[in-house]
Image (cartoon, rainbow, N blue to C red):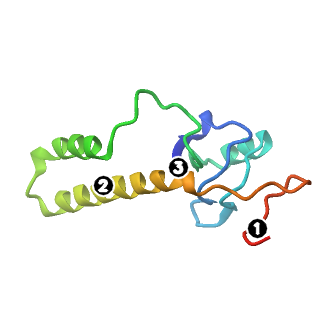
Amino acid sequence: MQRVPINLVEPGMVLAKPVVNDAGMPLCAEGTELTAVLIDRLKRMNISQLILKGHPVEMGGPAKSPEEQIREMTARFARVQGDPIMDTIREAIEKAILVESMEQQDEPAEQEGPAKADGVQGEPGE
């Protein structure tokens, strides 16, 4: 899964999470394959980023391990260490880094079923 700025999104990429507007109204479902028309429509609706399956966009530099990310983040919070609110925020970010790394490890196992002759993906058990 990768959060990608909408200006880097290209047709053929697939949503890993649903897209909702500011009011929480769903605009696109998880698993939607993006088209040029849909990307333009989302831009006009002021959607700034999407969460896509895999890592379709090189965002620069080699990926850092979760441990490196946590170490860097902890260093950024060093000046406010001991502040209960900032400690809570730091802990939440640390948890998010760990959850994301676990989701990334699970991605290869999330292979979709074989395509049917008409190009539609099969449902499990078909």
Q: Tag 2: residue type?
A: Ile
Label 1 to label 2: alpha-carbon separation: 35 Å
Callout 3 touching callout 2 (CB < 8 Å):
no
Q: Position of residue 114 (x, y in %)?
A: 77, 55
On the rendered structure, is 1 left or right of 30?
left
Which residue does the numbered mark 3 point to in the structure image? 1
For image coordinates 21% across by 62% down, the residue present is 88
**Which numbered marker is on residue 123?**
1
Q: Quadrant of the C terminus?
A: bottom right
Label 3 to label 2: alpha-carbon separation: 17 Å
Badge 2: residue crowd in 10 Å (few <14, some 14–19, many ≥20)? some
Q: Nearer the viewer, mark 1 or mark 2?
A: 1
On the rendered structure, is 16 left or right of 125?
left
For image coordinates 72% across by 54% down, the residue present is 32
Q: Residue furthest bottom?
A: 125
For image coordinates 84% across by 57% down, the residue present is 120
Which residue does the numbered mark 2 point to in the structure image? 93
On the rendered structure, is 92 left or right of 9?
left
Q: Tag 3: residue type?
A: Met
Q: Position of residue 78 (x, y in %)?
A: 12, 45
Earlier-in-chain disc, 3 versus 2: 3
Depth check, front residue: 31 or 89? 31
